[in-house]
Image: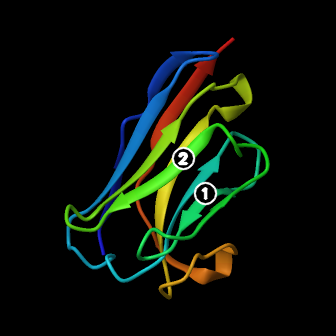
Amino acid sequence: VQLQASGGGLVQAGGSLRLSCADSRRTSSNNGMGWFRQAPGKERELVAAISWRGDNTYYADSVKGRFTISRDNAKNTLYLQMNSLKSEDTAVYSCAQGRGSLVPTKEYEYRYWGKGTQVTVSS
């Protein structure tokens, strides 16, 4: 599995970004996937997750209503649309592959993490 996140950058508070995660080895289409983030000095946290079919999702309370996770299995790509960004959303965002096909909501349910992309929100 080789996961690579992209789409991060610097954005003003209230702005939007769309992150993408490409699975270059095409091994994730049958697995649940998720987006994690880690801010300096803080623990890694699960932000959003999605089942293999995309019909079930999970969101952390801190991003509910602002972020949307989606996937395109034909393109082996996972997305995270982030709207109404806040300064507290600043972190390195990484995608991860779940062990099974359902929505992985706990960190131990993941087995592979990709390289992250930096998101910085200025206030």
16 with respect to 7 (left or right): right
N-terminal of the pair, mark 2 or mark 1, is 1
Q: Considering the numbered disc 2 on the image, is that residue within a helix, a strand or a loop?
A: strand
Instruction: Please give the name of the residue rendered at 73% of the width and 30% of the height, measured from the top-left corner.
Output: 88
Q: Is residue 56 above or below residue 100?
A: above
Q: Is residue 115 above or below residue 58?
A: above
**Kind of residue at badge 2:** Thr
Where on the picture, by quarter, is residue 120? top right
Mark number for residue 48?
Answer: 1
Where in the figure is residue 91, as x and y percent of width and height? Answer: 61, 38
Determine the residue located farthest toward the bottom in the rendered image.
100
State which quarter of the image contains the C terminus. top right
Where on the picture, by quarter, is residue 19? top left
Q: Which residue is mark 2?
A: 68
Disc 1: CA contacts within 10 A as few (<14), some (14-19) or many (>=20):
many
Q: Considering the numbered disc 1 on the image, is that residue within a helix, a strand or a loop?
A: strand
Disc 2: CA contacts within 10 A as few (<14), some (14-19) or many (>=20):
many
Where in the figure is residue 16, as x and y percent of width and height? Answer: 51, 25
Q: Nearer the viewer, residue 42 or 57?
A: 57
Instruction: Please give the name of the residue rendered at 63% of the width and 25% of the height, measured from the top-left corner.
Output: 84
State which quarter of the image contains the N terminus. bottom left
Instruction: Please give the name of the residue rendered at 63% of the width and 31% of the height, measured from the top-left corner.
Output: 90
Q: Is residue 61 above or below residue 24?
A: above
Q: Does the CB distance between marks 2 and 1 fall below 8 Å? A: yes
Camera-side mark, 2 or 1:
2
